[in-house]
Image: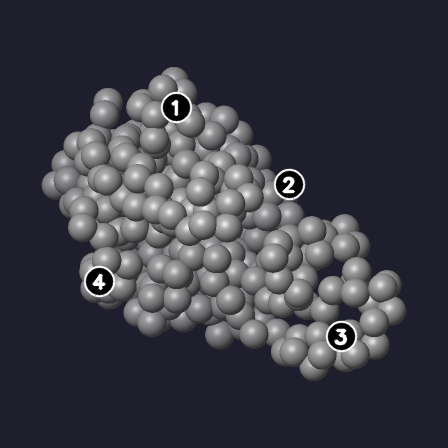
């Protein structure tokens, strides 16, 4: 079933002509590429592989710890909740998605148990102790927000998806469906810069010294809305991935910059009363017209 399809004429910045994976055609002239983005309900018939790819990107090197096929099926099993963004009609692959899963309602499903145990372990020694919220005796209803997009997608596609999610949760609650959340937990991905192994191997002492001095572990955001949402959070946590990338992986991800890029996981916990204000702030910051 197609969502209230908004033909949003977003202007995605690119260099001449940009692919889905963020590579450009090599032109030095900055242009604006007009793209019509359409919002759809998740479609079990066509979206399985696209959503699974985006989930793999979201969880980065730890994606192998979870049954992503089962998680994708769960997203597709609630097609009237959540959105996908496409550029070539409903039969095309999604370039972005956003949805929410009720961790309490699905707590007996193996993939949710995998995720819950992972989250509890990551927060065990931090101020964001999820065990009290996710434990079997907890009365809390945690809505796990999953969202990801391809690297060259404009951030302006995000506010409409959050706004539609608010509406859909309200509609679901009006129908007495299990979406009376007490908290929202957002999994996202940030990164830090690290000294490049390639430059060390090149034996350039001056450059190497500069990199080591600058590698202070500052957090950078892949998606600007994450920084906005954190300002409304009850608690946040930066966590290291369980599986480490192969040696030199940070250099493979350092496109067009001197430092290597090391992805780091991020959890943002927002109380129900603060969530609508957080969504509004995201829209104001990103300036979407939708």
Mark 1, residues whose alpha carbon is within 10 Å: few (<14), some, or many (≥20)?
few
The answer to which quarter of the image holds residue 39 is top left
Q: Position of residue 78 (x, y in %)?
A: 32, 31
Tags 2 and 4 touching, CB below 8 Å = no
Instruction: Determine whether 171 is above or below 154 in the image.
Output: above
In front of the other: label 2 or label 4?
4
Return the residue found at the far left: 174
Locate the N terminus by quadrant: top left
Q: How many numbered marks have been drawn onto this rendered protein structure?
A: 4
Q: Which residue is mark 2?
A: 64
Q: Are marks 2 and 3 in contact (CB under 8 Å)?
A: no
The residues tagged by marks 2 and 4 sit, at their Cα atoms, a distance apart of 36 Å
The answer to whether residue 102 is seen in the rendering is: no
Counting residues from the N terminus, which is met first, the one under dot 2 or under dot 3?
2
Residue 207, which numbered label?
3
Spatial distance from mark 1 to mark 3, Cα to Cα? 45 Å
78 relative position to 197: left or right: left
Lower sequence index among marks 1 and 2:
2
Pick the front one: 290 or 27? 27
Which disc, if any, is residue 92? 1
Q: Is residue 121 left or right of residue 178?
A: right
Q: Residues within 10 Å of mark 4 (few under 14, many from 20)?
A: few
Q: Is residue 3 above or below residue 64?
A: above
Mark 4, secondary structure of its residue:
helix
Marks 1 and 3: CB-CB under 8 Å? no
Q: Nearer the viewer, mark 4 or mark 3?
A: 3
In the depicted structure, whether residue 257 falls above or below residue 173:
below
**Marks 2 and 3, how far apart at CA:** 36 Å
């Amino acid at each position: 079933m197609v969502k209230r399809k908004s033909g949003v004429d977003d202007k995605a910045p690119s260099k001449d002509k940009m692919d889905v994976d963020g590579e450009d055609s090599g032109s030095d002239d900055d242009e604006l590429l007009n793209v019509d983005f359409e919002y759809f309900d998740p479609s079990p018939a066509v979206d399985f592989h696209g959503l699974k790819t985006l989930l793999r990107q979201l969880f980065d090197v730890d994606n192998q710890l979870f049954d992503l096929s089962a998680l994708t099926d769960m997203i597709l099993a609630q097609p009237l909740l959540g959105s996908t963004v496409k550029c070539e009609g409903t039969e095309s692959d999604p370039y972005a998605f956003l949805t929410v899963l009720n961790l309490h309602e699905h707590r007996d499903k193996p993939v949710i148990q995998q995720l819950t145990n992972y989250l509890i372990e990551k927060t065990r020694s931090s101020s964001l102790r999820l065990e009290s919220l996710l434990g079997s005796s907890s009365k809390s209803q945690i809505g796990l927000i999953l969202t990801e997009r391809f690297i060259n997608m404009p951030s302006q596609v995000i506010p409409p998806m959050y706004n539609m999610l608010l509406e859909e949760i309200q509609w679901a609650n009006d129908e007495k469906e299990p979406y009376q959340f007490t908290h929202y937990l957002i999994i996202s991905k940030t990164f830090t810069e690290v000294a490049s192994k390639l430059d060390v191997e090149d034996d350039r002492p001056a450059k190497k010294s500069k990199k080591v001095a600058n590698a202070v572990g500052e957090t950078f955001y892949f998606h600007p809305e994450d920084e906005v949402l954190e300002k409304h959070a009850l608690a946040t946590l930066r966590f290291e991935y369980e599986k480490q990338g192969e040696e030199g992986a940070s250099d493979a991800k350092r496109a067009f910059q001197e430092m290597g890029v090391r992805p780091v996981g991020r959890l943002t916990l927002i109380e129900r009363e603060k969530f609508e204000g957080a969504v509004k702030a995201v829209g104001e910051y990103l300036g979407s017209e939708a």
